Image: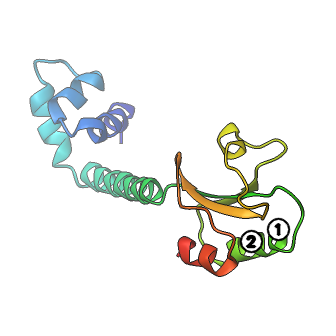
Amino acid sequence: MTPKQERFIAEYCIDLNGTQAAIRAGCSPRSANRTASKWLSKADISREIAQRTKQQLEAAQLSAVRTLEELRRVVIASGREDKSMTALPHAAHAVYQPNKVVLGTAGPVEAFAKTLPAKDGKATAYVCVGTACSLPTHEPEKLKELLK
């Protein structure tokens, strides 16, 4: 396969336009249509295009899944130390979720987390996606339900 054909494959995978891919690969605009047709009929070129297209689709699907499963943050706010301050993080970590972060409201955390208050002087958990959060809870079992 020539360097020009390699470039054609890369360009073709961008927009699936054979004529434009041939031009971008360095072919004459006058003969680009015929060249693209000829190259697309070659087994090694069409096989490489199929492989790259498959890779692009797999990458796009993975990206779509990551987008749909947006990062969830479990923010645990506490006005003082109490037993639920350890129970809530344990509950949050007990539910497997690959796109989950558990954080507090003090120290070097994002500004949004610092705005979530503890309620009734007890450790309070919020499950947030973006800037939208669930209603606060003090109960570890309720937190687990929110994460399912």
Residue shown at 14% from the left, 40% from the top: 38
In the image, residue 98 lies at what x, y percent? Answer: 60, 66
- Residue that sits furthest to the right in the current view: 81
Left or right of 96 in this view: 39: left
**Is label 1 in contact with label 2 (beta carbons under 8 Å)?**
yes
Mark 1, secondary structure of its residue = helix
- Residue 96 shows up from this direction: no
Q: Give the quadrant of residue 2.
A: top left
Query: Is 64 placed above or below 148 here?
Result: above
Left or right of 82 in this view: 55: left
In the image, residue 102 lies at what x, y percent? Answer: 71, 60
Mark 2, secondary structure of its residue = helix
Left or right of 75 in this view: 7: left
In the image, residue 110 lies at what x, y percent? Answer: 70, 41
| Amino acid type for the residue under numbered disc 2 | Leu
In the image, residue 116 lies at what x, y percent? Answer: 67, 49
Q: How crowded is mark 1: few (under 14 residues within 10 Å), some or many (20 or more)?
A: many
Q: Which of 2 and 72 is in front in this view?
A: 72
Q: Residues within 10 Å of mark 2 (few under 14, many from 20)?
A: many
Left or right of 8 in this view: 144: right
Residue shown at 9% from the left, 32% from the top: 34
The circle on residue 85 is: 1
Name the residue beneath numbered marker 2: 88
| Amino acid type for the residue under numbered disc 1 | Met
Q: Nearer the viewer, residue 7 or 146?
A: 146
Residue shown at 68% from the left, 46% from the top: 113
- Residue 115 shows up from this direction: yes
